[in-house]
Image (cartoon, rainbow, N blue to C red):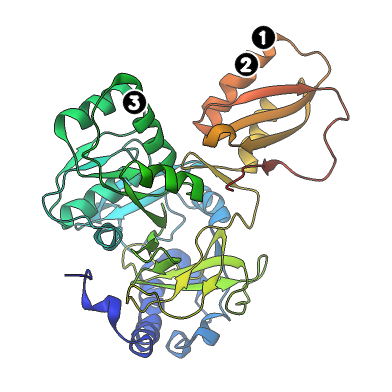
Amino acid sequence: MTYYDSLETRSPVEREAWLMAHLPQQLALARRKSAYWRQRLADVAVNSIGSRAALATLPLLRKSKLGELQCAAPPFGGLTATPMTGLSRVFASPGPIYDPEGQGQDWWRFARALFAAGFRAGDLVHNTFSYHFTPAGFMLEGAAHKLGCPVFPAGVGQTDMQVQAIADLKPAAYVGTPSFLRTILEKADELGADVSSLRKAVVSGEALPATLRKLLNDRGVVVRQAYASADLGLIAYETPSEEGLVVEEDVLLEIVRPGTGDPVAEGEVGEVVVTSFNADYPLIRFATGDLSALLPGISPCGRTNVRIRGWLGRADQATKVKGMFVHPSQVAALVARHGEIGRARLVVDNPSGHDRMTLHCEVADPSAALQAAVVASIRELTKLRGEVAFLPAGTLANDGTVIEDRRSYA
């Protein structure tokens, strides 16, 4: 079978009719069962929201506001439509932002992405997404099980042990970030281990530059991308045509002008806004903060849903590093912790293809002790390793930039 199900090849007219018929039903459910949406949609005639134009009249719910909403009404800001007793897991993303998971296999709807990448029943999947705090590990595990694939729950780190497990168990498939897949292959070369059983991969959490894709393909691993978030689950996925990412069947996607809720013309870069049809966690016009653009026409693979160009950057200054978001608020908290720091800017680059964070900060009296303390704070506040570069006062531009992404994907 070429397709996961018949939904992928229905006519665009049929799909749009389904989305518009279910949109007012989802709004009504959200208003009835969620405290937040009960207030937010109180004056909305939800039965009249049956078109994209009508949907565009509703305000955005920005991802960047989730932490604030959850602090005001813990644990989920009143956004869930299912009580805690009906959930299966709760996760924490940086911020912190707490994410619910409901009952049922493949609740995050990732099986479609794995199937499009060639995962089939019986394939052992080496899962290097984190099982700690964040939902990514469980997102992919649930999807693999839905397809009948056993999973090795590798998680992150411990590269030597990962290589040994792959050499011993000979998994057919990998899920994780593309940079960590490269690290595993390089470590296998160093150790003289045979990891050639890996033939297919679904990667997410960071960009996949053409140079890295070619490197992995040349090693015999066919790599496909998936675009997802801890709030929404799968949003879009890559198919064998490798021409953009096909939008998942159970979401309604808009591209809007950054800073507004106004949809842009096809092909214009804007912010990705998603309305999910999740009965446990209804998110309506959820502004992800990611930039992308719609591609014209239908995918050569035969899937008929709309496509996006993929991740094209951030509409705000939040930046994803090694699969984890780093927010300006975390940089501010770090500076506040160390009174010796004046102005600061977190610079993200990727020398040799690996993401690196360096906090450029102005200090009057740099010292090894301060450097060690700041490095420790970076690790504690972002859950990522970072470096420090001390600068004289007045070096950094006074332009409001808190996080600067200098990564090159050429």
Spatial CA span between label 3 and label 2: 36 Å
Q: Is residue 307 above or below residue 173?
A: below
Q: Quadrant of residue 377?
A: top right
At a point 56% along the width and 71% down the height, the residue shown is 255
In the drawing, does residue 286 fall left or right of residue 345? left
Disc assigned to residue 369: 1
Number of the front mark, 1 or 3:
3
Give x and y (percent) for residue 296: 51, 79
In the drawing, does residue 13 fall left or right of residue 352? left
Q: Is residue 216 above or below residue 336?
A: below
At a point 60% along the width and 32% down the height, the residue shown is 357
| Quadrant holding the N terminus | bottom left
The kind of residue tagged 1 is Ala
Q: Earlier in the sequence, mark 1 or mark 3?
A: 3
Q: Quadrant of residue 333?
A: top right
Disc assigned to residue 189: 3
Identify which residue, 43 or 384, lies in the foreground.
Answer: 384
**Residue 177 appearing in the image:** no
Give x and y (percent) for residue 323: 46, 42
Give x and y (percent) for residue 232: 40, 59
Q: Earlier in the sequence, mark 3 or mark 2?
A: 3
Q: Check if mark 1's residue and mark 2's residue have beta carbons within 8 Å.
A: yes
In the drawing, does residue 322 fall left or right of residue 304? right
SS class of the residue under badge 1? helix
Residue holding disc 2: 373
Spatial CA span between label 1 and label 2: 6 Å
Q: Is residue 88 above or below residue 392?
A: below
Q: Neighbour class for label 3 at 10 Å: few (<14), some, many (≥20)?
A: few
